[in-house]
Image: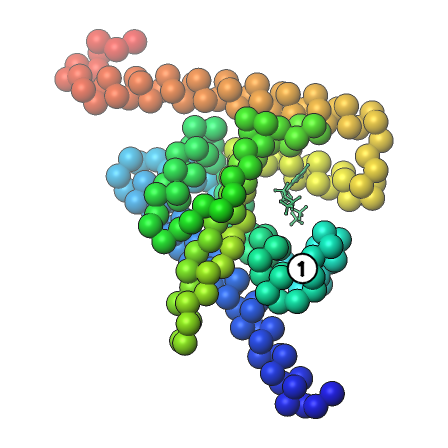
Amino acid sequence: IDPNQIKLIKTELTRFMMSYKFAMDELNTKIDILKQEFRYIHEYSPIEHVESRLKTPESIVKKAYKKGYELTLPSIKENVQDIAGLRITCSFISDIYELSEMLRNQKDIKVIKCKDYIKNPKPNGYKSLHLILQIPIFMSDRVEEVYVEVQIRTIAMDFWASLEHKIYYKYDKEIPDRLVAELKEAATSVSELDKKMENIHKEISQIKERIDSNDDPQEIS
Ligand code: 0O2
């Protein structure tokens, strides 16, 4: 191949991957701002923890191939929407929806897709809120619209998903029936725990509100 052609392809691929890194950085900053603002104003943040990752070129091509997409950059850009991914863990289910609303309300963010696996869990018990967002990235000579996948879940849902993910790969995607059933049972316990924690949280918030609006905290029991 002509060395100039190789150079051109290399530049194009680098720019392609860079746009996802920038989109991820931008969203990370937005989320960090929300987190800090919440901490200052409400002495509490709905965001516990944020992880981000870029798919490797190898896994991008693998996914595109598996799904039958054309193996060209424009097709990959349009169809593989989780090249940049953020996973956000919250303490409570209500925090997940609150955070999702905050992201929706940002003018430069477009919500392309929303999969609510909390209201409609997967048959294996998987729960999480998945958003495909599109955000503009301002490059030196153009504006790129880039997709980022955001997964929002509670700490308990995240605990379940990481264990299930490990088991899934340990058994090479063929989990024995006994473990499938145990995971399903564990997913039910996760949902019950999340509900209990949410109720306690609501109760504490109400007490705090009453204390804040009452001069005499002794009156509250
Ligand atoms: P990785 O390694 O986490 O990136 P689509 O692109 O919408 O046609 P897809 O990609 O299956 O189809 O979308 P979906 O259902 O929104 O799932 C995307 C991601 O959610 C997965 O990414 C996982 O991270 C997570 N996920 C979905 N289902 C499960 C599950 O049953 N268990 C666990 N532990 N995680 C799940 P990848 O690309 O599969 O892998």
Query: Percent x, y for residue 107?
Result: 33, 50
Q: Quadrant of residue 76?
A: bottom right
Q: Relative to 8, say whether 181 is above or below.
A: above
- Give the image's coloring scheme: rainbow
Element type at mark 1: helix
Q: Is residue 19 visible?
A: yes
In the visual, does 51 lie left or right of 110? right
Picture mark count = 1
Residue at x 67%, y 84% (from the top left corner): 6
Which quarter shows the N terminus?
Answer: bottom right
Query: Percent x, y for residue 2?
Result: 70, 90
| Residue that badge 1 annotates | 60
Query: Percent x, y for residue 60?
Result: 67, 59
In the visual, does 201 lie left or right of 11? left
Residue 74 or 220: which is nearer the viewer?
A: 74
Amino acid type, label 1 = Ile
